Amino acid sequence: MTWVVFNRPEKLNAFNEELWKELYEVLAGLSQDDSRAVALTGVGRAFSAGDDIADMLSLRTLERAGEYFDRIEKTADALSELDKPVIAAVNGLAYGGGCELLLLADVVVATDDSMFAIPEARLGLIPPIALSVGVHAIGLRRVSRLALTGEAVDAREAQAMGLVDYVVPKTELRSKVLEVAGKIFLNGPEAVKLMKRRLARGRSQLVHEALKDLSVLAVSDEAVEGMRAFVERRKPSWAP
């Protein structure tokens, strides 16, 4: 069992370009090692607050936006195509891209104080993984509600939606992840790898198409205003 820990607690483990790069490199290395499962979690009070919006504001051109989202796509593909089960251990906030990562995991365990949201549209952006993989993972209406309202839901509601599989007290998060991994380890390793390949089929193309749309939108006037408003802690110009 290998634990991958997001360690930017001062930024609620928000992903900047460097963190996306590091996660990709870690996942690429895990594809070659002998661990039988991978757990993702965060340091502090968040699993991940999603993309670092201040970092995204630096994407001034379509070319730079394409480079940025290509990196995210490579990471999403590496996560989807990993031939060992991925268990997300949610230890607090899972917002935006942090929540979307859960849709690429195989099992999600969350603490009972965790909160979940997909609020990208409030910044003039779209949630690419939710709009592609998420529709198949938790259903069209659930993704529509989360993406269109941007509202946060607690762990129990996320479990009812199918976004979370197990909800436990904070002190039991690690032990529950190990318990779930233990059940997986009862299965034949080659059978698990084959199931993983089957479950991942078609994901990459869906994510690719959605990220292409986002790379164009991210440098639009609307998105720049939305992200700038977020950083400046004010409402965007379109908000009532």
Image (cartoon, rainbow, N blue to C red):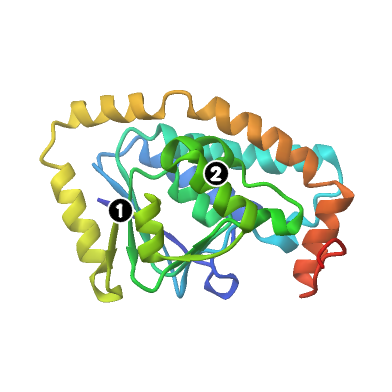
Query: What residue is drawn where x is 18% and y is 32%?
Result: 189
The residue beneath circle 1 is 165
Mark 1 crowd level (few <14, some 14–19, many ≥20, 10 Å Cα): some
Task: Assess disc 2: are there few (<14), some (14-19) or many (≥20) residues with their C-alpha within 10 Å of its C-alpha.
Answer: many
Write the residue at 64% across / 52% down.
148
Residue under label 2: 130
Residue at 23% from the left image edge and 31% from the top image edge: 192
227 horizontally vs 19: left or right: right
- Residue 131 appears at what percent x and percent y? 58, 40
Q: Relative to residue 194, is residue 19 depicted above or below?
A: below
- Going by the numbered disc 1, the residue's amino acid type is Asp
Q: Position of residue 198 (x, y in %)?
A: 34, 24
Q: Nearer the viewer, residue 142 or 200?
A: 142
In which quadrant will I find the C terminus? bottom right
- 236 or 66: nearer the viewer: 236
Asked if residue 40 shows in the view, the reply is: no
Label 2: state its secondary structure: helix
SS type, badge 1: loop
